Image (cartoon, coloured by chain):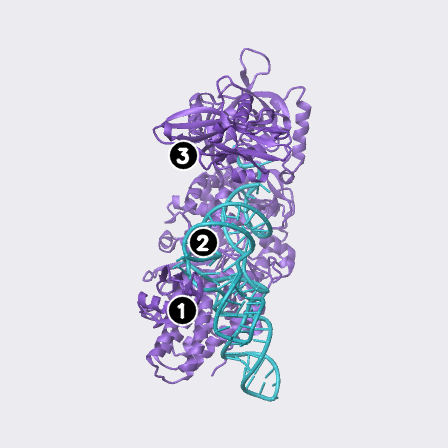
Chain colours: A purple, B cyan
Amino acid sequence: MKRYNPTEIEQKWQDVWERNGTYKVDFSDHSKPKYYGMSMLPGITGAGIHTGHGRTFQFSDIKVRAKRQQGYNAYNPIGWDSFGLPVENYAIKIGKTPRVAHDEAKVNFKKQLKRLGYSYDWSKEISTADPSYYKWTQWIFNQLYKHDLAYQKQSPQWWCETDQTVLANEQVIDGKCWRCGNQVSKKNLKQWFFKITEYADEMLDATDDLNWTEMVKTMQKNWIGRSVGAEVEFAVANSGDGDSEIGNRGIITVFTTRPDTLFGATFIVLSPEHELVKTLVNDETRQSVENYIADAARKSEIERMNESREKTGVFTGSYAINPVNGNKLPIWIADYVLSGYGTGAIMAVPAHDERDFAFAEKFNLPITQVIMPCSIDPINPPQAGFDEVVRETVIVHLRDKSTGKFALLDWHNSLDGITTAIMGGIEDGQSVEDAARAEISEEAAINNVTIVKQLRWITAAQYCASHKSQNRKAISHVLLAEIDSLDGQGKIDSNEQNLHTLVWVDEAEVLNRLTPAHQKLVWEQLNHETPISSEGILMNSGQFDGMESSDAREQIVDWLEQQATGKSKTTYKMRDWLISRQRYWGAPIPIIHCPEHGAVAVPDDQLPVILPELEDFKPRGGATSALASATDWVNTTCPTCGKPALRETDTLDGYACSSWYFLRYLDPFNDNQAWDPEVEKHWGPVDFYNGADHAVAHLLYSRFWMRFFYKLGLVSTPEPFGRMMYNAYILAPDGTKMSKSKGNTIDPLEIMDSGYGADSLRVYEMFIAPYDLEAPWDTRGVPGTYRFLNRVWTLAQEYIDAGEVNLTDTAVKEILVTAHRTAKKVSADINDDKFNTAISSMMEAVNNYYKLKVQYPVGKSPAWTYAVESLLQILSPFAPHITEELWSQMGHTDTIHVDHWPTWDNQYLQMDTITIVVQVNGKLRAKLSVVSDATEDDIKQLALNDANVQIFMGNKKPTKVIYVPGRLVNIVV
RNA sequence: GGGCGAGUGGCGGAAUGGUAGACGCGUUAGACUCAAAAUCUGGUAUCCGCAAGGAUGUGGGGGUUCAAGUCCCCCCUUGCCCACCA
């Protein structure tokens, strides 16, 4: 019997696969269905990968290997994300040029990936820093430029002082640089952008339908951040007492998602950076406004974000006119309004917005309620067709100061079962307070009360008074009243007693006792008054009073559009993609600046613009890259007029290079075009894609470009990735994230070299946890999977060494049920990305075979042959070397990795006898072994006759016997 | 503060509403061995019991159900994402 020696067989088979081109794909072979799967393009960020990365590559390898075995023409490509900040910083660290540092590091990356036995088609390897690749990245830039999707703009942008470059919004995480982790600041620079916002709507709309990990979809939607609302124009009022309030002092345009609250605007707030600010100040306010603006400018954006939410602000001295009611609103400046979002100005509606509320409270500004929160009574909801009767009411909570208890009413008669506070209608001519006192007197027989407060908000409740065929709307004023002590009062007369019972309840109990939702809302607001941000019914809103807020939103915008003082508007949180980098190691932006013709694209036939080899490539500050020093390269001629001109010295964001590589993989050596659309038509889109990072940036950029290519007719689908699996990280043994700087990474080579080999490592990587769960690396796990593979090896050796055996029908059945069940289960699990349970069922099968082989010796027979071969086939995506070796030792001359997957037969999915669980009142009391075709009646009878079952039934009669076919019997007594 | 997940042995983790803890690690006993390693076989949630068996048990508290880790409500803890986005 041969011993299992991973080191030897793994090297052997890797050589054979390479020699035979086992994983080499012929794009023109359409005789089989295609399958295109991969992990995200690896970036060369240091000396090599760790076991956390390895796990990610493994998932796609398994998916593609399984498909290849199932008869697909399956493609798993490999390449390198070579350009960009990570590589350049690595080069600076080790003191070499990026090209040299990259090429040297790649050697180890390749060694690691090859040793792990991934089924890459190495013949199609690409690198984003090869001129033959970035020629086409530049070509794509030209296409975007031609279609007005690339432009230059001067604006404040995130700047990383450490890395000496600007960064895209997506590369700033919690105010820190994605590479070095240092705080970034804003710098006003002229930069290149891609107009990704043009695709915001269609990307957002398409997101829900993607077969992607839900979390990533949510993150993408949040990032795009669509807000639907309106822009409203507020004219700045004349300061004097002239005839006309509205002069020509300017218009303030605000963005709001709640145009229905327009009548509730009581002031206007501008961001400190707003351009109108200087025209709004007067002699009295000028100094304080300037101080405030200077203060805000001094604080970095980060400080502003991290500070407590304590509102600050200053009055300008000017007023604006609310177009909807002519009200004069004071104009304030505050840094809680951001210049970068919407129009940098807001209408403040303190009654219905938390931030505005806090600001109004702090600076004592008016608060006007325009939305009544409205609850529909779930017990008697309004009925269609009934007349509506509106009634103003009071709701009074009454506290007994001596006990701290509150008065509630338990209602009888038609309101039976309902508990409320004291309440009732306001009669004509009665004040709210008088009505409250009257109700307390009537319902609680208490007279000398103190009204403590009246709630700012009024609320509405709608219900059906069915006996009167009316829909009632109660508009409620809410009050809190107190008495010193009951002191002999509170004896309700018998007439009232028929209607309700007065109860006194502890404060903590009130919320639980109140029944209608409306009453609960009132109580909560009474205890903690918060702005009403919910929907409701309009009030204080002129002609729109009584309207539902959702309807009012549309109607008010319509009205504004008629008056030409507003329009509907959608804004996005997502900004255009900033793609210039003041760094050397990237694809040069193919632009020539001509004094006469401005920014001119380098003609397609002159691409690529080759990145010159520079010895001194380090960033030198001042917002230009090292390329500016390459004067021979910078000085050129204008493609339009031929006169002297200068090359653009910014390079493209590395993310640009990786936004289309999945298309280049389909035609990696094409000199005439980026890819052949005919090849893409057959092979696109990517069927399976996974990674543990880039949930927003890379995936969003790739979707943007793909949609652009789709519009140009260059690709056949608008989305680049079909199934996208976002897998979790493997943590270091100490439970923290593996990282080179912490020195807690584990090199896969180390584990393979210590004698366990690639297969044990591969199986453990998949077995450790489900793909979406973080799990700490446990070095003791690899010996466990090594043991498992050894058991497979031994079983196969016994089979290979044995002669023919004859098996009884029972033996055949027992062996085949294990084999067929496992084949089915593992196939399903791989399909569902449940690799950990796939492995455990194979372990279970092997454990089973070990038990079976004691009774039924392993040997050449159809049952054992199927068992061993099917096991090797389903195991081979996980452990490709050992399975290939055993497959070959069994006498097969072809590879197990192409077109070999077991089929299963339903007749072998169940044993002849099955176990039925018997419960009495839901508790397990017995297990029955019955033939699989036993009838329900027989099984129930067996269950009832079981000795232990009878003990628990006692002499009671079963009231119910539940039978779940093939599983259990539950006897209810 | 908002959104979305998660909470199961000593550990990683299994469980279409139907035997909780599959599988693995660790551990423990036995076989083999002069011995050890490796390998093979058995045990391993907690408590009671010689055993058969019983009681308890999936963060806490309620509920729905013949039956709840799984569904519903409240609370606690924790992770991730977003965060003054109008």
Can residue A331 be seen at all in this image of the molecule? Answer: yes
Instruction: Please state which amino acid type lies under the numbered disc 1.
Output: Thr
* Chain identity of mark 1: A
Residue corresponding to mark 2: A724
Asked whether disc 1 touches disc 3, contact meaning CB atoms under 8 Å apart, the reply is no
Can residue A347 be seen at all in this image of the molecule? Answer: no
Horizontal relation, residue A291 to residue A395: left or right: right
Pick whichever, A796 or A430, lies toward us.
A430
Which is more foreground, mark 1 or mark 2? 1
Horizontal relation, residue A900 to residue A488: left or right: left
| Residue A721: percent from left, percent from top | 43, 52
The alpha-carbon separation of the residues under discs 2 and 3 comes to 48 Å
Residue A671 to residue A483: above or below: below
Instruction: Please state which amino acid type lies under the numbered disc 3.
Output: Asn
Asked if badges 1 and 3 are on one and the same chain, I answer yes
| Residue A264: percent from left, percent from top | 52, 25
Residue A245 to residue A59: above or below: above
Q: Residue at position x 50%, y 17% from top?
A: A429
The image quarter in which residue A818 lies: bottom left
* Chain identity of mark 3: A
Residue corresponding to mark 1: A822
